[in-house]
Every structure is written in C-alpha cells, then in structure tokens.
Amino acid sequence: QLLPYLEYYVSRLDVIGPHLILLRPHVPLLIEHNRIGKISPYIERLFQRGYRDLSASANMDVLLFWFGWTLSIPGLPRLFFALPASPRIVSFLANRLPKRFCRGYCTDVTCDVGGDYGGAWNQLTK
C-alpha cells in the first residue's frame, strides 16, 4: 500500500528521514482511508518553508484524530498548506491538542524528539 509513495519519500530522504522513525507507529493510521495519498502532495510545501520540527511526526495520531476528517473535503488541505504559517500552525497544534481521546491510557507516552538528528544524520563516518 505504500509502494506508490516510496519513490517520492526516498527521493526526499535527506529532509524527511528524521521524521520517518517517528511516523512508523502511525503508518496504519496514514494508510487508513488513503490519508497518506491525501497528505503526500503537501509534505513538500511544509519542508520548503523550513519545517524541521519533529513534534508533528511524533504526534501524527493526535493530528489525524482531530483533523483527519478535513482531508476528505476537496480543496481544504491545499488551502491550508498554501498558508505561509502552516508549518507553525501544525507544530502548535501537534504540541497542544488533547491526547487522551486518541491515546486513551497512553496519554503520557511521548516520543523523544530531542536534538539527536542533525544535518548529518545519515552520513557515514569511519
């Protein structure tokens, strides 16, 4: 189910790479209702505007719980991601929306989004 998007994400691995490990637990939610197909065209716009915050990737389940329904409204995702402030809005919402409704007993579980990934996260060293 992810094969159509593999080339897209592999070609942008330098930018998207640090987010992939945090998105892994949320892949079933992204595949459900073809959400990954609806989000993928707009991911590039976030990163073109300098989006580097890992909190949205770590809290993708929360964002999809609260705003997943908006992906089925024609034109609304394109309109939202066209906003210059969309990366800041995504980060703000990912960190501040209530998590208890979608995570249940795991509300206090968070992903470590510390500064472990830098600009050279995928460079080999001898």
Image (tube, rainbow, N blue to C red):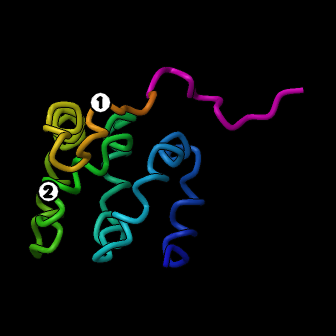
Mark 2 to mark 1 CA distance (whole Å): 21 Å
Residue at position x 37%, y 32% in the image:
110
Q: Position of residue 34 (x, y in %)?
A: 32, 76
Query: Badge 1, how many Cα within 10 Å: few under 14, some, many 20+?
Result: few
Circle nearer the N terminus (2, 1): 2
Quadrant housing residue 125:
top right
- Residue name at image x 45 percent, y 52 percent: 25
Residue 108: which numbered mark, if any?
A: 1
Q: Point out the stretch of residues depicted in magenta.
A: 113-126
What amino acid does circle 1 point to?
Asp
Is residue 118 in the magenta section?
Answer: yes
User: Is 121 covered by the magenta stretch?
Assistant: yes
- Kindly identify which residue carries mark 2: 67
Q: What is the quadrant of residue 75 in the picture?
A: bottom left
Mark 2 Cα within 10 Å, few/some/many (few <14, many 20+)?
Answer: few
> What predominant SS class does the magenta segment belong to?
loop
> Residue 27's mark?
none
Dot in front, 2 or 1 = 1
Position of 58 with respect to 103 (left or right) is right
Taking the image as shown, residue 109 lies to the left or right of residue 4, namely left
Counting from the top left corner in percent of width and height, residue 31 is at 38, 71
Q: Nearer the viewer, residue 22 or 54?
A: 22
Amino acid marked by disc 2: Phe
